[in-house]
Image (spheres, rainbow, N blue to C red):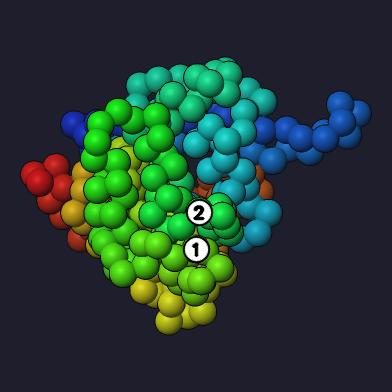
Amino acid sequence: MARSSDQTSHAAEIVLEARNVTLTLGAADAPVEILKGIDLSITKGESVAILGPSGSGKSSMMALLTGLEKPTSGEIIVSGTPIANMDEDGLARARRGTIGIILQAFHLLPTMTAMENVMVPLELDSGDDIRDRAQDALEKVGLGHRLGHYPAQLSGGEQQRVAIARAIVGQPDILFADEPTGNLDGETGSEIIDILFERHRHSAATLVIITHDRGLAERCGRIITMGDGRIVEDTGIREGMTEAVAGQDAA
């Protein structure tokens, strides 16, 4: 039986909620139900895997939780702010400093260097330290020596590291990674996952990984399993995995 996230920690701060969320696509006379009444809450500092095969609804759920798509019905609340009915400008403001997203396809701008790609999320920030912050983010993912290189000059693993640096440079409260190793070989993918969990251990951010890989999911403190547009299992914070959250709160 699925265990509600409210059972995991009564005192923890909820940073992400979905309340009876649905998503229906297609024409009115031939609707396709993608998500079917999702209820979910995630607390500060958790590492969460959203696990499921292709077609289970996991990537659609991520798109709704990050504001990239709008639900057909229901509420989505990010750090206390309802986002389901926001316009694009409102969503951009709500995501800024709150949500970081790492996509499987990297989505780096080919005419910009690694440094410039990482600076993009900071372009609305004031201050003289934007370049320093971008450089620091790249150094944290092991690319301090590649600041001036363009995406075409970088390997797949290096491009994914730039994407991670771009996602963490604004120090978001919630970091999403959508199949982060999908375009990488096994060894490189393992290195990327190690970087993600290392950054999670050294921050108070919540980490949400969307994956079909059971082995990767097992590295997270909580596993939410999707099937046919529904949550079919939620482990809650698993025994022996609570230290990560406690350690981050104390940091």
Closest to the observer, 8 or 203 = 203
Instruction: Please rate how many residues cluster around mark 1, counting C-alpha atoms within 10 Å: few if below 14, some from 14 to 19, many from 20.
Output: some
Picture mark count: 2
Q: Position of residue 244 (x, y in %)?
A: 19, 54
> Which residue in the protein does label 1 denote?
150
Q: Horizontal placement of 203 versus 197: left or right?
A: left
Q: Earlier in the sequence, mark 1 or mark 2?
A: 2
Residue 81 vertical position relative to residue 140 in the rendered view, above or below: above
Report if the CB atoms under discs 1 and 2 are less than 8 Å apart. Answer: yes
The residue sitting at 57% across, 40% down in the picture is: 63
The residue sitting at 58% across, 35% down in the picture is: 68
Q: Position of residue 16 (x, y in %)?
A: 39, 33
Q: Residue furthest right?
A: 29
Marks 1 and 2, how far apart in space? 6 Å
Which type of secondary structure does the marked residue at label 1 adopt? loop
Q: Position of residue 1 (x, y in %)?
A: 45, 48
Instruction: Identify the amino acid type marked 1.
Output: Tyr
Q: Position of residue 71 (x, y in %)?
A: 62, 28
The residue sitting at 44% across, 65% down in the picture is: 149
| Residue 234 visible, this angle | no
Instruction: Identify the amino acid type marked 2.
Output: Met
> Which residue in the protein does label 2 denote?
112
